[in-house]
Amino acid sequence: MDTVQEIEAALSHLPVKDLEAIERSINRLKQRQPDSGGYEYLQQEYGITREEWDRFVARREQEIQADQAQGRMKQFTGDIEQDLQD
């Protein structure tokens, strides 16, 4: 099934109780999904404190700036061909 219409057509043949069970399952899965991978997920899964996260972010930012200053890392401009030539 590749389109929303095909999925809707397939689901329309199921009894309401099955559709409700599917909806509950989807909602449970959504609740388990990590957000963008940031602090909240790390806190929930690994017990990382906000202070630990902030220290990591600050340290990583310093490493990125140092790498850029020494030419080991470059900011992507959106033009890969140009970036590779520099």
Image (spheres, rainbow, N blue to C red):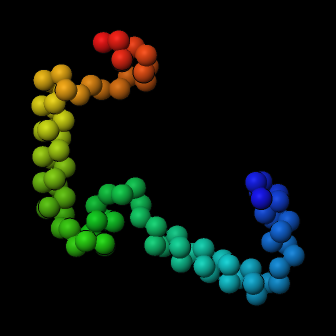
Which quadrant does the N terminus fall into?
bottom right
Residue in front for this viewpoint, 34 or 84: 84
* Residue at 31% over, 73% down: 44
In the displayed structure, 44 sits above or below 36; it is: below
* The residue positioned farthest toward the bottom in the image shown: 17
* Residue at 60% over, 73% down: 26
In the displayed structure, 63 sits above or below 57; it is: above
On the picture, is 57 further left or further right than 18? left
Q: Position of residue 3 (x, y in %)?
A: 77, 54
Q: Position of residue 7 (x, y in %)?
A: 78, 63
Q: Position of residue 50 (x, y in %)?
A: 19, 63
Q: Image quarter for residue 77?
A: top left
* Residue at 83% over, 79% down: 14
Q: Position of residue 80 (x, y in %)?
A: 42, 21
Q: Image quarter for residue 19?
A: bottom right
Q: Total label count?
A: 0
On the picture, is 43 further left or further right than 83? left
* Residue at 40% over, 55% down: 36
Which quadrant does the C terminus fall into?
top left
